[in-house]
Image: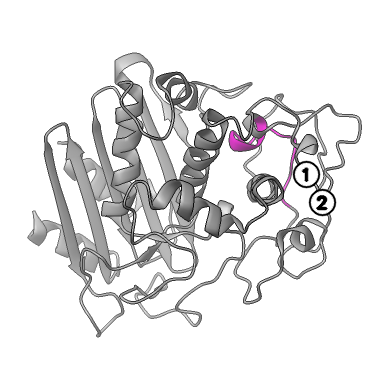
Amino acid sequence: MKTTLTKLMKTYHVPGMGIAYVDKDKAFIISLGLAKIEEEDVEQDTLFHACSISKFVTAMFIVKLCDRGLLSLDHPVENYLCSWSLQENGNGPVTLRHLLSHQGGIEDPERSFGIHPGCPNMAQILNGETPACNTRIEAVKPPNQEFTYSDAGYCIVQQVVEDVLDIPFETAIDEHLFRPLGMNRSMYEPTSPMTSGHEPDGTVMKDRIPHYPYAAAAGLWSTPSDLMKLVKELFRSLNGEGILFSKEYALDMISPQGAASWAGLGFFLDGEGNALEISSLGWGEGFQSMLVAEPFQEKAMVIMTNGNTGVHQMQGLIGDVYRLLKL
């Protein structure tokens, strides 16, 4: 299999890749290629930028806080916010459930939420006071009516956490999620060993370690094996054996939300019943990743790469790997 995977990486000009795979009691981890072209090898503990897989991780964290009674999925987020206020414009109250499923009526302004080298606080970002987002975020549509993919929605989630717990989001998620699950290689300021991002032609991108100051939405650095720990915890929760939250919350996460049959809390849904498949995709400057699982079959794979193929994951290297492992 490694020979086939290496050939696929060469075809798509992707220098490095990490894979974690689980099928009930069968499991393996594969690390291939280079962390940076012509430099060190990818190892099991080498960090990749998870990009929007950060949203799945954030959702697991929020659901734990709800299970502990610190938050509620269905209370208006405005009740929790202190450092910033969401203008709902008469559209009705927005909840964490709405934001986690991209149905809060929040739209990302054009040319927002890309790489940004600074470290503005979240209230500044949401107020439109930084180049990261130069327009104040508001609810422009009624919640629970329409799916609109939104990084800004997850930024509001992050502000809720920081206002309620009165500590930085990164500190809170480390305390409540990463440490309990032994996710020692999951963080928002990467440490060596780490990968560099690469362009579609395989060259190292100019900002080889991209920085997104939106931890909850897109800031996570992690490894396939660390993310698989989180997937396994979801499996345990569905069996009533999880340490983060109850079976009822786990079932809620993987159930269709609002007006979008394909939207769960923090990931996308495909199929139903025992054939249900959940997925989370990460695509940013220099990196692409995918997490996909069949929760009732206890099957999952996490594929992380340090290359941007320029096409959707399922049309490039990650799609080929997914189909190869599904056989």
**Front position in the image: 48 or 323:** 48
Is residue 253 shown left or right of residue 18?
A: right
Q: Which residues are magenta?
A: 98-108
Residue 11 in percent (x, y) is at: 24, 65
Does residue 307 lie above or below 65 as drawn? below
Task: Specify the label residue 81 is tagged with.
Answer: 1
Residue 51 at what x, y percent from top left?
48, 57
Estimate the x, y position of residue 313 in percent, counting from the top left: 39, 50
Give amino acid for label 2: Trp
Task: Say which quarter of the image contains residue 41.
Answer: bottom left
Residue drawn at 38 percent across, 52 percent down: 179
The residues bearing labels 1 and 2 have C-alpha atoms spaced at a distance of: 6 Å
Residue 215 position, x and y percent, is 57, 58
Amino acid type at mark 1: Leu
> For the view shown, which residue lies furthest in the right direction?
90
Examine the rendering and report whether any part of residue 218 can be seen.
no
For the point 69% across and 45% down, the residue is 164
**Measured along the vertical axis of the image, is residue 322 above or below residue 214?**
above
Q: Which residue is mark 2?
A: 84
Query: What secondary structure is marked by label 1?
Result: loop
